[in-house]
Amino acid sequence: MSSESGVRIVVTGATGNVGTSLVRLLAEDAGVGSVRGLARRIPDWSPARTEWSAVDLADENSDLIEEFEGADAVVHLAWAFQPTHDPVATWRTNVLGGIRVFEAVAAAKVPALVHASSVGAYSPGPKEHAVDESWPTHGWPDAAYCREKAYLERSLDAFEHEHPGVRVVRMRPAFLFKRESASEQRRIFGGRFLPGPLARPELLPVLPDIPGLRVQALHTDDAARAYQLALHSDVRGAFNLAGEPPVDAQTLGEMLGARPVPLPRPAARTAIAAAWGLHLLPASPHLFDAVLRLPIMDCSRARTELRWRPERTAVEVLEEFLQGMRQGAGANTEPLRGRKVG
């Protein structure tokens, strides 16, 4: 994409975990002329060359075409994780809202669309070796998050067939963390009343070692840099994004000075299901099932074609995130507001 006159970028979900990192990068990018951030609530935050629009993707009356007109690229990040007990509500925002974004990109004749997919879109895969972007993206059907990410992959397949002139990039990142996202992610996955200060090594003498619990993590700023690189290039298609090394109980045990203790899958799932059923835990047992089946991703394509490499290891990412949890860290947007408990 040419940056001679400064390109215009529109970002949906601009006040969330990835959105705040990307908007900050684009605001400092000399090749970007302006950024329009779309969010349900306009933040008290004014990055350079950035303007805001209050838009709810679940609202069928939102005029996305008007928001997108004149843009050189749309980056679609918006996503609702909750309510996990109401999959119809998340489907309305994530899937139907996502399809409205795609349709508006075509109607407004935007030449490039960068879509936030996920490792969660992948079908169950190996933990012992990495898979590239050709691995099937049918998700884990019992988990709403995976089901919705996979559905949008199919929607994009049809979109690319119908609109070959639009350059479509699909980012498939691992789990994304940064210090400022700690309070939000504690609320989303652990619940409003889980005390952040509990995430202290001295309070965790043992860790559950659950078969299959081996995942990848990435700093959100590193993921945002991959989006930025894609905006300034002519690449198309999917890109895996993850840090090293993959994280398992052994890695976490060494990081926290805790001893991994084997815990059978059924016992762990029963506990999570009970807490979720009582509305004590927002993360569903279905998502737990999916995480145990996620493949390890090979990120060679991003390194080769985007010249992208994460600046932080997965261990450094998690250390920063846990420190943020203990401190109730956040940012000056509604989704990322900092808070320790409640």
Image (cartoon, rainbow, N blue to C red):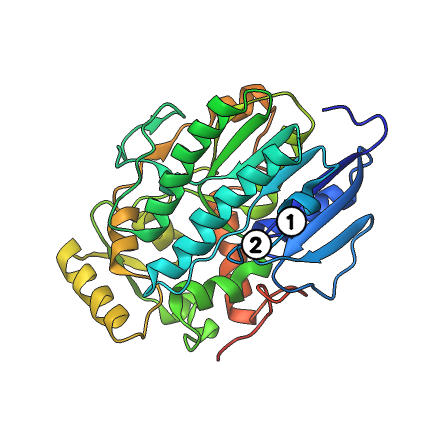
What's the residue type where badge 2 is placed?
A: Asn
The disc placed on residue 337 is: none
- Choose top left, top right, bottom left or bottom right for residue 203: bottom left
- Choose top left, top right, bottom left or bottom right for residue 42: bottom right
- Callouts 2 and 1 close, C-beta under 8 Å: yes
Q: How many marks?
A: 2
The disc placed on residue 17 is: 2
Q: Position of residue 257 (x, y in %)?
A: 38, 59
Residue 279 to residue 266: above or below: below
Q: Which residue lies at the image location 41% right of the left edge and 26% below the top edge?
A: 133
**Secondary-structure class at tag 2:** helix
Residue 66 to residue 62: above or below: above
Distance, label 2 to label 1, CA atoms, is 7 Å
Whether residue 309 is visible here, answered yes or no, is yes
Q: Position of residue 162 (x, y in %)?
A: 49, 24
- Choose top left, top right, bottom left or bottom right for residue 132: top left
Q: In this image, 28 relative to 336: left or right?
A: right
